[in-house]
Every structure is written in C-alpha cells, then in structure tokens.
Image: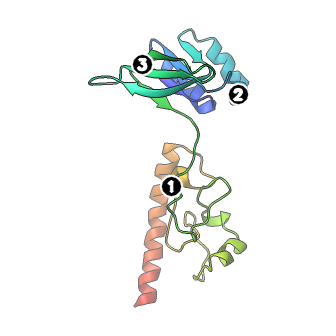
Amino acid sequence: MAVIGGGNSAGQAAVFLSEHANKVSIVIRSGGLEHSMSSYLIDRIKKIPNIELLRYSEIRSLHGSSRLERALLLDNRTGETRDLDVAHVFIFIGARPATGFLPENVLLDEKGFVLTGEALTEKHLARVEWALERRPYLLESSCERVFAVGDVRSGSVKRVASAVGEGSVSVQFIHRALAALAEATS
C-alpha cells in the first residue's frame, strides 16, 4: 500500500494500514515529515517496521492489467523514475474545496470553504444583499436556501460521520426554508 502525503492524516492512515498490509510506503515530495506532521506520530511511524518513507518522491502514473499493480515514482531532485509494487494508493494531500463553480453570492472563507450560519456576519449579509428577514439557518450559505455540509463547509471537522450528521440536520432546515417560501408565494 502507498499513502501519498506527509500530514497527520496521512501518518494516521499509514499507522492503521500497517496493521493490515505487508508494507506501507509513505510518499512525500519533501525530505522529511517534521514540518507537516506531529512529532509523536513521526516517532510512532519510525517504530513500525513495515512502514517506509519515500522522500522526494511523487507518483507519476499508476499501472496494472485488471487491478493496480505498481506506481511509477519520480525523484523530484534527480528526475529519475522507479517502479513501486503497490496494490492500493491512498491520497492525503490536503483539502482544497471544489467551490470554484459557485456563484459570487455564496461567500467563501480565505481558503475557499463555504461560509454558513453563524459564520456569516451582518457585513457578509449586506454584501450579498440578503433578502430574508431571518438570519441564515445553521448550515445555510449566504445565498438563500443554499446549504453546505461536510468538508466544503468552513469550520467543518472534515470527518465522514460529521458530514453525514450535517446532511441529516440540514434536511430539517431545507424543509423549513421551503415551507416559508411556499407560504410567502401563496
């Protein structure tokens, strides 16, 4: 197995996967983990014999016939390539939200995550000319009746269970918003 990335999520994944795999390769572009991973996790990884750290490496392509068999690694210092036998690749290279398609009235934080609920200030709402008498609901964006949940939401905890929970909570607010809209238009 290969884990791409040098942050805490990648390290935790590598530790977990090492209990289920013969070998786990952590593939990082830099020369070490010290600038991106907690020292306790680095120490733990060093003690696990079936985890290897592949420094200055980038996966350039994946190969196999009916399943993944190997990855082509590039040494980003020398330009040399080599094959890594691997059946599974897990990518932990950071969270960059895919919010570029959203209209301008869905406000984002400085990292591109959707602002919702209490994170929206009066200044935000004035900027988008919020038309409703009420403030945005808990998971509602700065665009009326548009909700954001999970990893794309500013301030989320970036966990699947939280995203599922936010999704189920948002349903009650969506019903409330749609009921208010139906009442206003009838």
Select label 2 or label 1 by which is in front: 2
Residue underneath mark 1:
166
Quadrant position of residue 12: top right
| Mark 3: secondary structure | loop
Label 3 belongs to which residue?
Answer: 86
The residue located at (43%, 78%) in the rendering is 179
Which of the two discs, 2 and 1, labels the residue nearer the N terminus? 2
As drawn, is 108 to the left or to the right of 64?
right
Q: 10 Å neighbourhood of mark 3: few (<14), some, or many (≥20)?
A: some
Q: Amino acid at mark 3?
A: Val
CB under 8 Å between callouts 2 and 1? Answer: no
Quadrant containing the N terminus in the rendered view: top left
Residue 61 makes an appearance in the image: yes
Q: Characterize the local packing of mark 2: few (<14), some (14-19) or many (20 or more) Cα atoms within 10 angstroms.
A: few
Query: Counting other residues with Cα less than 10 Å from the Cα at mark 1, is it few (<14), some (14-19), or many (20 or more)?
Result: some
Q: Amino acid at mark 1?
A: Glu
Determine the CA span between mark 1 and mark 3: 35 Å
Percent across and percent down for residue 134 are 60, 79
Q: CA gap, disc 2 to disc 1?
A: 29 Å
Look at label 2 and name its amino acid: Ser
Which residue carries the number 2 mark? 38
Residue at horizontal 55 percent and vertical 51 percent from the top = 97
Residue at the far top: name it.
49
Tell whether label 2 touches label 3 (CB within 8 Å). Answer: no
- Compare marks 1 and 3 and give the one earlier in the sequence: 3
Q: Report, in whole angstroms, how far the alpha carbon at label 3 lies from the one at label 2.
A: 26 Å
Q: In this rendering, which labeled residue sits more in front, label 1 or label 3?
A: 3
Q: Is residue 15 visible?
A: no
Counting from the top left corner in percent of width and height, residue 3 is at 51, 26
Tell me if residue 179 comes above or below residue 106 in the rendering. below
Image height of 60 relative to 186, above or below: above
Query: Measured from the top left, where is residue 186 in percent x and y?
Result: 39, 91
